[in-house]
Image: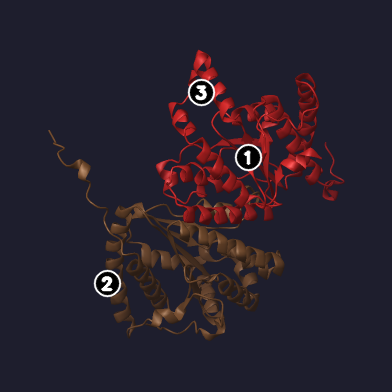
Chain colours: A brown, B red
């Protein structure tokens, strides 16, 4: 099964460079076929989510990480927009506020974890605290290693208390980012998405890839895997994230709660 | 220094029964002397807290645990009432709400941790999740051990990110609890504090002592010590908690932030 090859469950022998952002391992053929496949998957996912919500027992956390323009917002829109809003919540993590900086970096993250029956999408996450922070040397390698351990412990807490965590690295190439940034500049309707600081971050591309490789290697476990999602193709990216969710539901097998015997005999008068 | 004998930094050779709830190890003599000592300590603590708040860098978390009537509320009132409310916050943890139960048990706790410059008092805490839960067999020993590990990891996160944690077990005898419950029943003004379920919990005294001993042994580290506070005497209890806070400040040595050179030359016109 191709998905397995993109699921990282251990840091051993993990090499980000071996994944081609332009590849389309989940593709069934041409774009039309893939779009039809996404539609079918979405319908199945929605049905599963309804039962998952009714079950009100377990939780799902989807972490979306990737370079600027890698398609985090687009994934949310394309793969999850038809989900029941009662059971799904998107949390976008920006630069921490002074109030957030006054606590430990996992504080604001813990506050936003999914509750029973809920699916939460993290648009960026606590991983920024070992990515941008490391790239700019705001933290040294020793602090970074300490945070890897803290993050593993935090995610272990979540999984041991009923949360399924899937972490998706939306993997684009430096050339694809260039094209997308140029597209934003060329289209006045996309100017609002253009942030000049993205250009500054882009200069650190190699350092970011190193930081991602290191963070993914250090925090991939069988219980909290990372998925490397080749994302130069938006269609492929959406298809693969939908397949990942389908796999999660296959594992969880959501079921409606059992019938309540204590309700027998109640008459509606 | 007597305080050291009551600071538990390791589970090795820890035996709760070796601590006498009626003892007064910190006492300087008679009650009047001790009350005068508390007053002096309070003044010094208040001064230290002002600087700690101005420093706006580190955090202090005081966990108060103990059987019903052991004096958690009383400690807050007596030792901390003169602190600057800007820099102190009390969090009382009750039975978790449905909304809290829908997350992991550390979720609501993490939300309430102190921010920079703040002192937070936990009136009961995440330790209830390995105490009442264990006594009533709502969790088995395996789950309890798992939680000890989760709690250690959680507290390590807090300490590694700038929080000093002190955990106080307010240690009263079963006889002293009887006297205090009877006093509540005898005084109509104290009836509001009487909870019939306390009587049910009291029947599990031995199991509670075992659960406390086990939890304290499993979660005492040099960085996150437990203090055993003999608390049959309210005056002694207050004196000892004040001494513990004084010791914390001696270790932390709060200091005002350095003068800002960029403010030089500014004229008030």
On-image quarter of the C terminus of chain B: top right
Left or right: A38, with B47 as reference point: left
Q: Report the chain holding disc 2.
A: A
Callout 3: few (<14), some (14-19), or many (20+) C-alpha neighbours within 10 Å? few
Left or right: A60, with A206 as reference point: left
Q: Which mark is residue B193?
A: 3
- At a point 55% along the width and 34% down the height, the residue shown is B67
Callout 2: few (<14), some (14-19), or many (20+) C-alpha neighbours within 10 Å? few
- At a point 44% along the width and 57% down the height, the residue shown is A90
Q: Are marks 2 and 3 in contact (CB under 8 Å)?
A: no
Residue A96 percent coordinates (x, y): 61, 55
- CA gap, disc 2 to disc 3? 59 Å
Tell me if residue A137 can be seen: no
Left or right: A268, with A204 as reference point: left
Q: Are marks 1 and 3 on the same chain?
A: yes
Q: Which mark is residue A40?
A: 2
Residue, far right: B265
Residue A110 percent coordinates (x, y): 53, 53
Q: Is residue B201 above or below residue A200?
A: above
Q: Nearer the viewer, residue A204 or B231?
A: B231
Q: Report the chain holding disc 3.
A: B
Can you tell which of label 1 and label 3 is closer to the viewer? 1
């Amino acid at each position: 099964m191709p998905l397995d090859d993109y699921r990282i469950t251990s840091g051993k022998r993990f090499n980000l460079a071996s994944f081609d952002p332009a590849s389309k391992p989940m593709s069934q053929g041409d774009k039309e076929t893939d779009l039809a496949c996404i539609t079918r998957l979405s319908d199945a996912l929605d049905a599963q989510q309804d039962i998952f919500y009714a079950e009100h027992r377990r939780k799902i956390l989807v972490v979306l990480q990737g370079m600027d323009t890698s398609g985090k917002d687009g994934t949310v829109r394309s793969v999850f927009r038809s989900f029941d809003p009662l059971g799904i919540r998107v949390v976008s993590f920006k630069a921490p506020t002074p109030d957030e900086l006054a606590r430990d970096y996992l504080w604001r993250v813990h506050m936003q974890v999914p509750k029973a029956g809920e699916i939460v999408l993290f648009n960026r996450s606590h991983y920024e605290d070992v990515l941008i922070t490391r790239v700019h040397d705001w933290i040294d390698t020793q602090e970074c290693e300490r945070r890897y351990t803290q993050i593993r412990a935090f995610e272990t807490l979540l999984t041991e208390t009923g949360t399924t965590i899937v972490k998706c690295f939306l993997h684009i190439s430096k050339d694809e980012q260039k094209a997308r940034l140029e597209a934003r500049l060329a289209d006045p309707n996309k100017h609002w998405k253009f942030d000049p600081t993205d250009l500054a971050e882009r200069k650190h591309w190699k350092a970011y890839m190193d930081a991602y490789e290191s963070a993914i290697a250090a925090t991939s476990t069988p219980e909290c895997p990372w998925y490397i999602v080749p994302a130069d193709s938006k269609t492929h990216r959406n298809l693969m994230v939908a397949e990942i969710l389908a796999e999660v539901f296959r594992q969880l097998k959501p079921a409606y709660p059992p019938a309540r015997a204590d309700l027998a005999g109640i008459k509606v008068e």
